[in-house]
C-alpha cells in the first residue's frame, strides 16, 4: 500500500540546503520534491529518551524543517548507556533542552520547538495539533494510550516503537488508513505483568535499531514514498537477528476507530485506565507504607524486622539496602516465598520504586502477616534520602 505524501513541498531550497542534502537529492524517489516536503514538515517526538535520541538525531540530519521535543525529565547518568543525544556534561540538565542543543549542532537549519512539560490530557490535543506527524518514544502504557487516542481524534498518523531487553517492535498507526494502537492492544496489560525497561533493562543499541525504523517510516510518510508500516507490526529480535512483520488488521469493533466508537474524546485519567498498581496492591499498601527514612530509623533502633528485597538478583547486585534478604517477586506469586518469612518478626518489603513490593505486600498480608509494611519509593528513595553515596539505576 502506498499513501500520498503527508506534506506539501516548501517553495524552494537554499544553496546551503542543496549542498547539505545532496545525498538525498540524488536519490530519484526523494529528489528535490521530497526534500522540500521534509523542509515543510513538522514532526513531534514524544520523549527524548532511548527511542527519541536516535529519532531526533536522524530527523534533524534528514532536514525535517520543524522538530518538536516534549520531555519533562532531566538527564541521569543511567540514561547515557542508550540515550545518545545526551552527553556526560548534560547530566542534570532538562532532556528537552539537552536534546534541542544536539539537534541544533547536527543541523542548525532545523527549527526546534521545546515542550518542557509532561504530556497530559490538558495539553496533548493542542500540542499535537501543531504537527503533521508524531513519533512516539514513550516507555509507559498510560502515555501510549493517550498518544494513540489524541492522534486518532486529530486524524494524525504516528510512528510507534517499543523496546525491552533484546526485543523491539514498531508500527505506524493511522486510523484513516489502517489500525490504531487499540486495534492491536485493546486493553492495557494487567498492572505489574509487563516490566518496564527500568525494571528489566534494555540493550542500548536496540534503541538505534527501533528508533531508526521509526525515522525511516516518518520520512516515507512525509514524502509519500515506499510501502509504509501501516497495518503491519515489525518485530525485531536482536539475539536471533531476525525481523518479522505481522499483519495488523483494523478492528471494526475498536472502541476508538471502529464502526461504533464509544471513546469519542480523551479519557479523563490514563494512569487509572492502565492502573499503575492493581487494586489489591493499592489496598494492601494503604496505611502500610513506610518511608526509607523510617526504615533506617527502625534499623537504628534495632527493631525486630525482617527486610525483604523483592527485586531480581541483577538489580540486587547493582545496589541493595544493608540487611535486606533477596526474595524476587515471582516467589511471592508462586507462593514459595512465604515459608521463608519468619513468624516472629515484622516483615518489611521493598523493591526499586514501590510498585512490585506493593504487589508482594498484598500476598504477604493475605497469608496472615497483618503488620507487614512496604517501603514507598523503594531502593531509589533509600539512595536519595538515606545514603546518596550508593548508585542509582
Ligand atoms: Zn482502533
Image: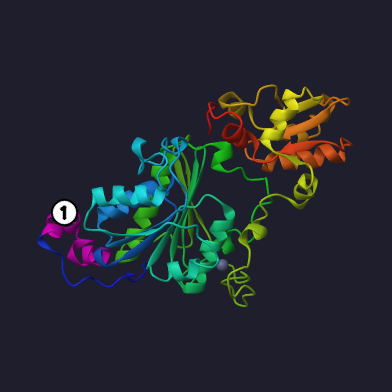
Q: Decide which of 231, 340 is in the foreground and name it.
A: 340
Q: Position of residue 279 (x, y in %)?
A: 76, 52
| Mark 1 neighbour class, 10 Å CA radius: few under 14, some 14 to 19, many 20 or more | some
Image point 38% across, 47% down: which residue? 53
266 lies left or right of 295: left
User: Ligand 1 shows up in which quadrant of the image?
Assistant: bottom right
Residue 231, x across and y down, in percent:
48, 62
Q: Residue furthest bottom?
A: 260
Say which quadrant the N terminus sits in.
Answer: bottom left
Position of 227 relative to 57 (above/below): below
**Residue at numbered disc 1:** 20
In the image, 55 versus 111, the foreground residue is 111
The range drawn in magenta is 16-38
Q: Quadrant of residue 322?
A: top right
Name the residue: 26% across, 55% down: 62
Q: Which residue is outermost to the left?
A: 15
Name the secondary structure under disc 1.
helix
Magenta stretch encompasses residue 21? yes
Residue 286 appears in the picture as rendered? yes
Q: Inspect this view and state whether residue 309 appears.
A: no
Amino acid at each position: 500500500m502506498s499513501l500520498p505524501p503527508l506534506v506539501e513541498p516548501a517553495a524552494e531550497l537554499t544553496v546551503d540546503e542543496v549542498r547539505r542534502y545532496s545525498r538525498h537529492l540524488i536519490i530519484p524517489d526523494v529528489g528535490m520534491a521530497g526534500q522540500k516536503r521534509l523542509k515543510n514538515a513538522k514532526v513531534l517526538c514524544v520523549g527524548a529518551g532511548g527511542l527519541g535520541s536516535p529519532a531526533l538525531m536522524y530527523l534533524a540530519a534528514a532536514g525535517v524543517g520543524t522538530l518538536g521535543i516534549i520531555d519533562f525529565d532531566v538527564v541521569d547518568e543511567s540514561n547515557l548507556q542508550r540515550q545518545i543525544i545526551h552527553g556526560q556534561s548534560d547530566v542534570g540538565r532538562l532532556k528537552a533542552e539537552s536534546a534541542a542543543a544536539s539537534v541544533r549542532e547536527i543541523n542548525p537549519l532545523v527549527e526546534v520547538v521545546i515542550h518542557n512539560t509532561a504530556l497530559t490530557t490538558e495539553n496533548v490535543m493542542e500540542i499535537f495539533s501543531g504537527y503533521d506527524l508524531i513519533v512516539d518514544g514513550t516507555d509507559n502504557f498510560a502515555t501510549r494510550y493517550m498518544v494513540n487516542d489524541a492522534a486518532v481524534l486529530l486524524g494524525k498518523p504516528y510512528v510507534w516503537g517499543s523496546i525491552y531487553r533484546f526485543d523491539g517492535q514498531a508500527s505506524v498507526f493511522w486510523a484513516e488508513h489502517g489500525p490504531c494502537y487499540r486495534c492491536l492492544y485493546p486493553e492495557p496489560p494487567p498492572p505489574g505483568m509487563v516490566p518496564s525497561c527500568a525494571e528489566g533493562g534494555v540493550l542500548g543499541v536496540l534503541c538505534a535499531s527501533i528508533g531508526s525504523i521509526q525515522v525511516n517510516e516518518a520520512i516515507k510518510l512525509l514524502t509519500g514514498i515506499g510501502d509504509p508500516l501501516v497495518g503491519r507490526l515489525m518485530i525485531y529480535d536482536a539475539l536471533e537477528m531476525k525481523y518479522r512483520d505481522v499483519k495488523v488488521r483494523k478492528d471494526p469493533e475498536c472502541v476508538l476507530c471502529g464502526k461504533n466508537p464509544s471513546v469519542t474524546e480523551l479519557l479523563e485519567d490514563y494512569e487509572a485506565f492502565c492502573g499503575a498498581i492493581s487494586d489489591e496492591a493499592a489496598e494492601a499498601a494503604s496505611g502500610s507504607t513506610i518511608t526509607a527514612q523510617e526504615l533506617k530509623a527502625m534499623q537504628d533502633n534495632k527493631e525486630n524486622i525482617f527486610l525483604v528485597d523483592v527485586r531480581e538478583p541483577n538489580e540486587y547486585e547493582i545496589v541493595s539496602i544493608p540487611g535486606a534478604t533477596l526474595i524476587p517477586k515471582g516467589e511471592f506469586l508462586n507462593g514459595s516465598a512465604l515459608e521463608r518469612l519468619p513468624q516472629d518478626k515484622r516483615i518489611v518489603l521493598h523493591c526499586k520504586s514501590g510498585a512490585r513490593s506493593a504487589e508482594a505486600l498484598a500476598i504477604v498480608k493475605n497469608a496472615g502477616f497483618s503488620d507487614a509494611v512496604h517501603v514507598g519509593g523503594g531502593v531509589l528513595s533509600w539512595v536519595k534520602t538515606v545514603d546518596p553515596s550508593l548508585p542509582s539505576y
